[in-house]
Amino acid sequence: MLLERGVILPKRRAPLIKRLDELMAGELPISQRARQLLLDLRDEWMDQDRRIKAYDDELMALTREDGAARRLATIPGIGVINATALLAAVGDASAFAKGRDLAAWLGLTPRQHSTGGKTKLLGISKRGNKYLRTQLIHGARAAMAHVAKKATPVGTWVRQLLTRAHPNVVVVALAAKLARIAWAVLRHGSNYDHRAATV
């Protein structure tokens, strides 16, 4: 709305809020009606922020109260949102015989095309729970650099994979690994131990 009136604002959130407050305190080259509309939009934005914070606080409280969610949240790349989403979707993971089954259910395993005794791995199947798959991929992307620096079995595996595959492929592979680790934590009721997490 302001760009149409020649007012250019930064794209990032914090600078946008700061600049918008400065403009609202000073003289804006807009009509009084446009100013009121801008105030209404800013109030709506702040109300949405308050609602999101309330939901975030509720998820944090749920994670603190639930032992399985607390254990899941200790896995790198699986925070409060992923932990509560995994619990809501799979419960204690008893529906899956092994971790690979959970990763396949989420669509994080490669599709295969076999003919004449030759097996070709294609992209991920993208079957199953799209929201959970997306969240795990985002979590893996956020945690990949941190995990790769660690002298753990998973860190070593990520570093080796990065030498021969594109980073986006490694992110999806790490997301599948996180799903398998989450299955083990849920199924066995154990805590995540980065030293014991195997390839």
Image: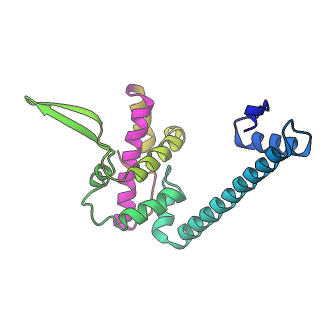
Q: Residue at coordinates 87% horizontally, 38% vertically from top-left?
A: 28
Q: Quadrant of residue 11?
A: top right
> Which quadrant, please, contains the C terminus?
top left
> Which quadrant, please, contains the N terminus?
top right
Task: Return the x and y of residue 8 as percentages of the image width and height.
Answer: 77, 31
- Say whether residue 190 is left or right of residue 40: left
- The answer to whether 11 is drawn above or below residue 35 in the figure is above
Q: Quadrant of residue 184?
A: bottom left
Answer yes or no: is residue 43 visible.
yes
In the image, 30 versus 155, the foreground residue is: 30
Answer yes or no: is residue 72 visible.
no
Task: Return the x and y of residue 30 as percentages of the image width and height.
Answer: 84, 38
In the image, 149 versus 23, the foreground residue is: 23
Q: Quadrant of residue 121?
A: top left
- Say whether residue 131 is left or right of residue 100: right
Q: Residue at coordinates 54% horizontally, 70% vertically from top-left?
A: 62
Q: Which residues are magenta?
A: 164-190
